[in-house]
Image (spheres, coloured by chain):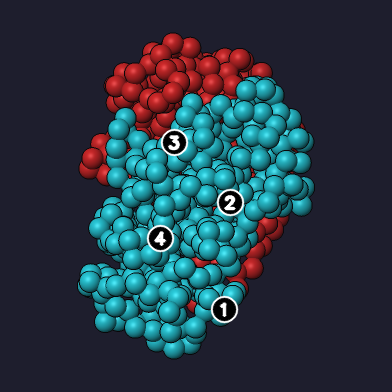
Chain colours: A cyan, B red
Amino acid sequence: MTARRIAVVGATGAVGREFLRLLQARGVPAEDLMLLASARSAGTTVEYGGRPAPVHALEGASFAACALAFFSAGASVSRAHAQRAVQAGALVVDNSSAFRLDPSVPLVIPEINPAALGAHRGLLAVANCTTVLLAMAVHPLRRLSRVRRIVASTYQAVSGAGARAIDELRRQSEAWLRNEPARPEVFPHPIGFNLIPQVDVFDEGGFTREEWKLVRETRKLFDDPELAVSATCVRVPVFRAHSVSAYVETAEPVSAGAARAALAAAPGVLLRDRPERAEYPHPLDATGRMEVLVGRVRSDPFEPRGLHLFLSGDQLLKGAAGLALQLADQALGPVGRSDCNAGGA
Amino acid sequence: MTARRIAVVGATGAVGREFLRLLQARGVPAEDLMLLASARSAGTTVEYGGRPAPVHALEGASFAACALAFFSAGASVSRAHAQRAVQAGALVVDNSSAFRLDPSVPLVIPEINPAALGAHRGLLAVANCTTVLLAMAVHPLRRLSRVRRIVASTYQAVSGAGARAIDELRRQSEAWLRNEPARPEVFPHPIGFNLIPQVDVFDEGGFTREEWKLVRETRKLFDDPELAVSATCVRVPVFRAHSVSAYVETAEPVSAGAARAALAAAPGVLLRDRPERAEYPHPLDATGRMEVLVGRVRSDPFEPRGLHLFLSGDQLLKGAAGLALQLADQALGPVGRSDCNAGGA
């Protein structure tokens, strides 16, 4: 029998659930799924196609019947179990940071570096969500000039911190509106009607790990080890789309008009840039879309090689589950759209 | 009789109310106030000292008994009425943009350019709130090196758009949490659990007027017409403290340690920079404080003359009413803390 099942590791998480929504929309039958999670969540169910679908323990699960295994349960889970799935013959699409910088693992965004996909050895890495969205907006400018430097400030939705963080924003907002105290559990400070200028843990030089991901993963995606990316990552009280304010410095001057034309022509990007109509990206407009919205494109008034832009993108879709499925489609053929659901093994 | 009354123009607005709260805390009696507003609000009352205080029409009101007139009702109101108050002998402290760039009007922050205050001709301008907060955080670095350039992305609270905007965020958030539609009235898009990358109207080069204020007013405050400030101003679903993520480029390299020491020693600034304890500025911590909180101070990994920082400050206090009162204190003597409430005329 051909392996045709799709394993979803981290099926109860925010990204895992989004992945299931996408599979459901493609008509993948429940019996073709293998939903896995930590021992804590094993034995529970998640809703799939209007019915409860059982979640099993990852520990000891066999990937033998799987053509595809999607991992979204954190780097330590991927490090412990992903190779097991590869060895069982599944294509692993890993949403964690475990293998992203491994030179033998392709870090791919189809609109940016599709050729890198061919080199895979059974494992593909999905880049950090903020990195994906920023790279999608900056890559089209690289056709006009080499990009030397990016200074980015982010506005990151709580979905990036998982399902419990989404609940926390809701709970704290409700409490605040009732004049009740909003005790933080997931985040170090309240996020309801507040901001937290910390995403992930602090690392070298006072930058967070998230801020370093933007440096290292963008360099790998662009195959440009010299690119300078300096970021400040900030959590905002938004549910699921991330935004970035970016200053982009190119080697040669690029006009705002040329930049806009390049963005308008770029696959996976929607130019939203008619300020006179209050048209520019914002998270609610980006929510539910695979495209990254880019606008507020303008030349720096003082630096002829400087451009500014603002982008919003659905963190759970293009930034995670949607991109993972896009990668599986490229590697295996359209998932859920052929007889063999994961495109055959 | 010596003029001793304090006129508050725009008494029903978000900044006007904050100004009244400050006067009340200083024990200024209600009979020393003259509360003025547009014809629309005239005849209403605002709460002062636990009692309703009447609001009168600005049109036709006499400033003859006033030692101090605080204007916060927009630039057109200030243009129409501020000179009238000056001619009547009041010191006008204007919170609007009407006179900020007028060379004959001092634009002052006492911690930055106190000497400029002496030159006033009866009128002092309060800088744009975001500009004040950013200038407070950057000025201490100027003792270490000339600052050549600032790239700023802002996270601006709805209070900056006035009392109706505060109501709109509350109303839309409640609606969203009940799964009801959130219709925008004050802002062009929903602000509840969303962001809007537009503050004020669009102007030259695709930058908003708010973004240009950061250029021109910071230059005047620092007396440095060459300073480059490139900003992206974004409204966030926060009630009353603004934040800014700033990249600061100096003429000579400045270490993060030296920058931190300068900030720690700066009056009006509170250094909040112990990431290992999750200590950094955030809006809820800044709310209700006159000090600007600064943290996340770090050297750019690629540009030796580059520093990054994040700041939060109370937009209604240091960014508006609190600074206005501070200016009046400097010009007239402590308001509400002497026999003559506005320090005498």
Name the residue carrying label 3: A215
Q: CA distance from mark 4 to mark 1?
A: 20 Å
Asked whether the residues under marks 1 and 3 belong to the same chain, the reply is yes
Q: Nearer the viewer, mark 4 or mark 1?
A: 1
Residue at image coords 73%, 34%: A256
Picture coordinates of residue A118, whole percent (x, y): 52, 49
Q: Nearer the viewer, residue A305 or A123?
A: A123
Q: Residue at x 54, y 37 (%)?
A: A222
Question: Could you confirm whether marks 2 and 1 are on the same chain?
Answer: yes
In the image, which is nearer the foreground, mark 2 or mark 1? 1
Q: Secondary structure at mark 2?
A: loop
Badge 2 amino acid: Pro
Q: Position of residue B100 (x, y in %)?
A: 63, 28
Q: Position of residue B227 (x, y in %)?
A: 58, 18
**Chain letter of the residue beneath label 3 in the structure image:** A
Residue A181 visible in the picture: yes
Dot 1 amino acid type: Asp
Name the disc covering residue B162, or none. none
Name the chain letter of the residue that bears numbered label 1.
A
The mark nearer the N terminus, 2 or 4, is 4
Q: Which residue is mark 4?
A: A92
Q: Residue at x 60, y 60 (%)?
A: A290
Of pointers 4 and 1, the one earlier in the residue sequence: 4
Q: Disc 2 and disc 3: Cα gap in Å?
A: 20 Å
Residue for badge 2: A110
Identify the mark at residue A339; answer none if there is no mark: 1
How packed mark 4 is, by other alpha carbons closer than 10 Å (few <14, some 14-19, many 20 or more), is: many
Q: Earlier in the sequence, mark 4 or mark 3?
A: 4
Q: Is residue A332 above or below residue B216?
A: below
Residue under mark 2: which chain is it in?
A: A
